[in-house]
Image (cartoon, grey):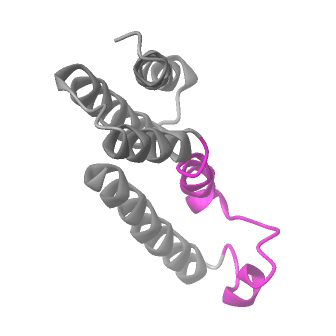
Amino acid sequence: MLLQVALIYAIYALISVRRKAAVRAGSIRTSDFRENRNEPPESLFVRNNLANQFELPVLFFAACLALYVTNGVNILTAVLAWIFVLSRCVHAAIHVTTNRIRHRQPAFVVGFFALLAIWLWFALHIAGLI
């Protein structure tokens, strides 16, 4: 969970850097960010990635906390959690640089299925089946 949080903060830092560069380059004015309707090309991929960090990762945080409070954490769930977070790091790196879908999608899919497996394990754990 800490690495996922660190990733989110890193993306916030990156968007700040990219937006400042866009202002310095003259492609946008600082006041344009007040309503945030126009994102300059320099920071568009970063803004989109930042939004992604509050979609599927929200389910990750919920799963981690649910597993913790029900004593459902084990080596399998820990490995799956690491796979999820590392896939999010790879996904973010691709998203804020080249943003090539053919590279980004596999990273997303790996994380998607790792998180699905966590939730399936949690469901079985709660049902008392494992």
Q: Where is residue 36? Give x, y as percent.
A: 76, 73
Coordinates of residue 38 in the picture (x, y in percent): 79, 67
Does residue 52 appear in the picture of this structure?
yes
View extreme (bottom): residue: 31
Query: Which residue lies at the image location 36% right of the left edge and 58% below the top edge?
Result: 5
Query: Viewer-proximal residue, 47 or 2?
Result: 2
Number of numbered discs: 0
127 in relation to 72, above or below: above
Q: As rendered, which of 65 and 21 lies closer to the eye?
A: 65
User: Residue 26 at x, y = what percent?
Assistant: 64, 79
Q: Which residues are magenta?
A: 27-55
Above or below 89: residue 101 = above
> Relative to residue 117, is residue 38 depicted above or below?
below
**Residue at the (36%, 37%) spot, across then down:** 67
The image position of residue 31, as x and y in percent, is 74, 90
Report if residue 46 lies within the magenta region.
Answer: yes
Which residue occupies the extreme top position in the image? 129
Q: Is residue 89 above or below residue 51?
A: above
The image quarter in which residue 37 lies: bottom right
Q: Nearer the viewer, residue 50 or 79?
A: 79
Instruction: Name the residue rendered at 67%, 87% in the picture.
Output: 30
Q: Taking 22 as reference, is 92 left or right?
A: left
- Residue at the image point whose x is 41% and y is 24% from the top: 118
